[in-house]
Image: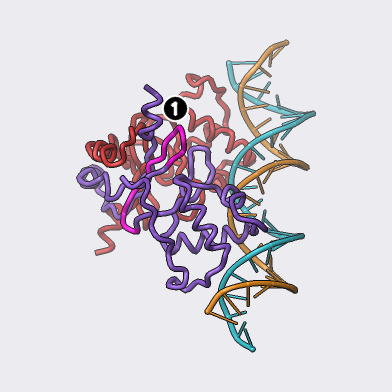
Chain colours: A red, B purple, C orange, D cyan
Amino acid sequence: MRPSDPPPLPSLRAAGMRHTPQRQHILEVLQQGDHPFTVEEIWERMPKGRSGIPTIYRNLERFIAEGWVESVLGEDQVMRFVRCHSRHHHHHIQCERCGKVVEVDGCALGSGLESMERQSGFKITRHKLMLFGLCPICAEKER
Amino acid sequence: MRPSDPPPLPSLRAAGMRHTPQRQHILEVLQQGDHPFTVEEIWERMPKGRSGIPTIYRNLERFIAEGWVESVLGEDQVMRFVRCHSRHHHHHIQCERCGKVVEVDGCALGSGLESMERQSGFKITRHKLMLFGLCPICAEKER
DNA sequence: TTTGTTGCAAAGGGTTTGCAGGAGA
DNA sequence: TCTCCTGCAAACCCTTTGCAACAAA
């Protein structure tokens, strides 16, 4: 579990991007919230002067390409963006009550993949898994 | 594996819907193709007279509510719709080359879920998994 | 100074809504 | 006949594009 160990902000420079306040802010917003944000939510949280929506879209696209951010389509069919803590294979679990998201390293599928390959005859190359449930705090309240 | 055992067309009547040619056709299109279709692709395949796009959206929404159809967002960020063969828990595997989709009954996660629960502290209640790979035919060509 | 970035405005494109006419039962 | 359903057109809304001004290095 890694609910409270934010990774350092990635180096824009190292990824061949110029450092701009807008990029810094987008990453900070995603960094600080522990749940996915819509583009509009990110925009609302941008400091004074409020950057343009297109800037946010353009940068999210680059951050996703770098593996710093991931997009998830919620049940409400709205696209949201989360900061990826790990660059390795991982999955996100979102709390259905408070929206909090944590990352789980590694893959839950394991031998399940082989069984699905046998069943289907397919050679499985990649997958996208989104998990939903109750975080420890909300689970406690539920009882 | 169940690539070629289409379920009977569901009973519109039993679901409280009137039987209309449009509904029949939408279900038939999804039934016959073994891969997800965009709304436009369904529309192109509608017999003579071509129904309206809104009709397709409205009906897909109802079919999804009935569990007859599932929506999947492809890697190209386009929404597609597939016929669900099973009403039980299942996953779809899509061939990255030919687009064919098959269903795998049951769940590949199994004990992986418990491990993720332990790791995260979350109580996992549901998940959405999309698998990609190569179908037997395309895998053969690949070699 | 050079070139990548931003912001604005407008275009784009998929999806939804309102409403009157039409079809199922 | 009574509703439900469809089709059209328009509205919506999220996302992308073009372009000139701006700022990082």
Residue B123 location (% of width, % of height): 26, 53
Q: Secondary structure at mark 1?
A: loop
Query: Would you place residue A47 above or below residue B30 in this image?
Result: above
Asked whether residue A131 appears in the rendered view, the answer is no
Asked whether residue A47 appears in the rendered view, the answer is yes
User: Three-letter amino acid code at disc 1?
Assistant: Pro
Q: Neighbour class for label 1 at 10 Å: few (<14), some, many (≥20)?
A: few
On whether residue B134 falls in the magenta region, the answer is no
What residue is drawn where x is 49% and y is 29%?
A: A65
What residue is drawn where x is 37% and y is 48%?
A: B4
User: Position of B74 compared to B112: left or right?
Assistant: right
Nearest the viewer among A128 and B85 is B85
Nearest the viewer among B133 and B77 is B133
What residue is drawn where x is 32% and y is 42%?
A: A3
Residue B85 location (% of width, % of height): 37, 54
Image quadrant in which the C terminus of chain B is located: top left
Query: Quadrant location of residue A108?
Result: top left
Residue B39 location (% of width, % of height): 57, 51
Which residue has dot 1 on it?
A10
Residue A35 location (% of width, % of height): 42, 46
User: Position of A49 compared to C8: left or right?
Assistant: left
What residue is drawn where x is 28% and y is 62%?
A: A141
Number of marks:
1
Q: Which stretch did the figure color magenta?
A: B87-100
Nearest the viewer among B22 and B48 is B48
The chain that hosts pointer 1 is: A
Query: Quadrant location of residue C9?
Result: top right
